[in-house]
Amino acid sequence: MARALAMGPKLVLADEPTGQLDSRTALRFFDVVLDRLDGTDIALVVATHDEAVANRMATRWTMDHGRLVTGRRPGAAAA
């Protein structure tokens, strides 16, 4: 992730970037990454099964039976 961000891309795709970390370390990792991205024009797309990580994202999209469900902001009421 650090190498990807160092290149200054417009888009970073991350597939389970914290899959091998414990939940506390995963959340701290994303605190650092999201802080680094704040105020930039870099888009971050994260694929994860970790609800806590997903809830840290500005917008959350979900797959349901192979279909992409409408994105929503974490904490917003589901339609």
Image (tube, rainbow, N blue to C red):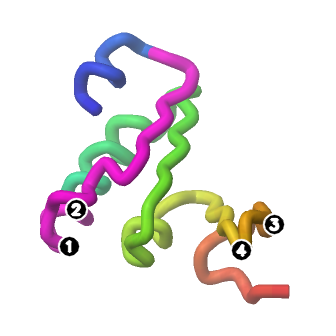
Q: CA distance from mark 4 to mark 2?
A: 24 Å
Q: Residues within 10 Å of mark 1 (few under 14, many from 20)?
A: some
Q: Earlier in the sequence, mark 1 or mark 3?
A: 1
Describe residue 15's horizontal placement relative to residue 45 as left or right: left
Q: Quadrant of residue 43?
A: top right
Q: Quadrant of residue 45?
A: top right
| Numbered tag placed on residue 23 in the rendering | 1
Residue 1 percent across, percent down from the top left: 28, 32
As displayed, is residue 5 above or below residue 35? Answer: above
Residue 10 percent across, percent down from the top left: 56, 20
Magenta-colored span: 9-27
Q: Mark 1, mark 4: which one is toward the viewer?
A: 4
Q: Which residue was labeled with disc 3?
A: 70
* Residue for point 68% across, 67% down: 63
Residue 55 belongs to the span the image colors magenta: no
The residue furthest front is 65
As displayed, is residue 50 above or below residue 3? Answer: below
| Numbered tag placed on residue 26 in the rendering | 2
Q: Which residue was labeled with disc 4?
A: 64
* Residue for point 73% across, 65% down: 66
